[in-house]
Image (cartoon, grey):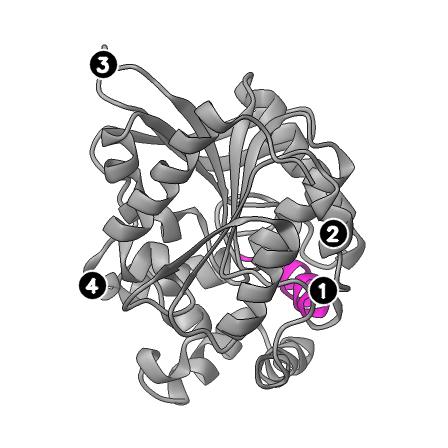
Amino acid sequence: MTRQATFTPPPGARAYPLRTARGEFAVVDSSPRAGAEVKGVVLMLPGFTGSKEDFRLLHEPLAERGYRVVAVDGRGQHESDGPVDDESAYAQRELARDVLAQAEALGVPVHLVGHSLGGQIARAAVLLDHSPFLSLTLVSSGPAEISVSQQQRVKLLRDALAVLSMEEVWEAIQAMGPPEEVGGPARGPGAPEQLRRRWLGHSPAQLLATGRQLCSEPDRVTELAAVPLPFHVLSGAHDDTWPVAVLDDMAVRLNAHRTVVAGAEHSPGAEQPLPTAQALADFWDGTHTAGTHTP
């Protein structure tokens, strides 16, 4: 299903640069049909090597439930500018401050959603200042560093980026096998040429810095659990980046709502978009009546 999707914005959505106090960020922004009640605004952060297009299949079903969805390319991702050789620009605190600026630019409190790396950046933003957010959903994003097998894959990528150009790394990735087996930047919601352009749009410094973060992230769940927000931990039924049992335990520690999407792995929003959208909207609907999380 994900291989047939495209990078074209879904019906009713528009792509534009969101202007913030920390610069412009490329977004895809969709709203419920004209005249319909908007229940809330959602800010979605993509994962490592990903982009705002990873959420493409969620826009329409969430709009039908009354939610405006703003999916963003972070600094140095795909269509958002960023330094190509300054890793310090991508320190997690800097990326978290970008998220706070994006939320401020939207002008209303938002439901924050982060996929994988985006989840850890979202967590960092909430820990800096939770006031712009109505809730936090962590999608396939665990409590600390990624699994050993995924750390090895990230290290291979970082080693390649140290000696090869982005184009050369892409060719090496293609030579490794079919996208379904290779995964990473070769697998996503678009045609091969669109995925290639997305890869080439990334800043090497962003990939190096965030790859290092994924391999060394500390466990901050106890700190997060003290924040007065509703939490949601959503994942597929299988995940080799953070084992599902680890995500289950994190949800317990956060007193979070927990969703496991059948038939999905690390990217439930692309692999099973309809049940993923339903779970997200059900959670947000519930926060409207249940009040805030009490740690």
**Is tag 4's residue or tag 1's residue first in the polypeptide sequence?**
4
Element at label 3 = loop
Q: Residue at x 51, y 78 (%)?
A: 168
Would residue 91 be visible to someone looking at this image? Answer: no
Q: Amino acid at mark 1?
A: Gln
Q: Amino acid at mark 4?
A: Met
- Report which residue position mark 1 lands on: 213
Asked if residue 114 lies left or right of residue 204, the reply is: left
Q: Are marks 2 and 4 in contact (CB under 8 Å)?
A: no
Q: Amino acid at mark 3?
A: Ala
Q: CA distance from mark 4 to mark 3?
A: 29 Å
The magenta segment is 202-214
Outermost residue, top direction?
35
Label 4 crowd (10 A; few <14 / some 14-19 / many >=20): few
- Report which residue position mark 2 lands on: 92
On screen, 223 above or below 33?
A: below
Q: CA distance from mark 1 to mark 2?
A: 8 Å
On screen, 30 above or below 225?
A: above
Asked if residue 118 lies left or right of residue 196, the reply is: right
- Report which residue position mark 4 lands on: 1
**Is tag 3's residue or tag 2's residue first in the polypeptide sequence?**
3
Report if residue 74 lies within the magenta region: no
On screen, 91 above or below 292?
A: below
Label 1 crowd (10 A; few <14 / some 14-19 / many >=20): many
Element at label 2 = helix
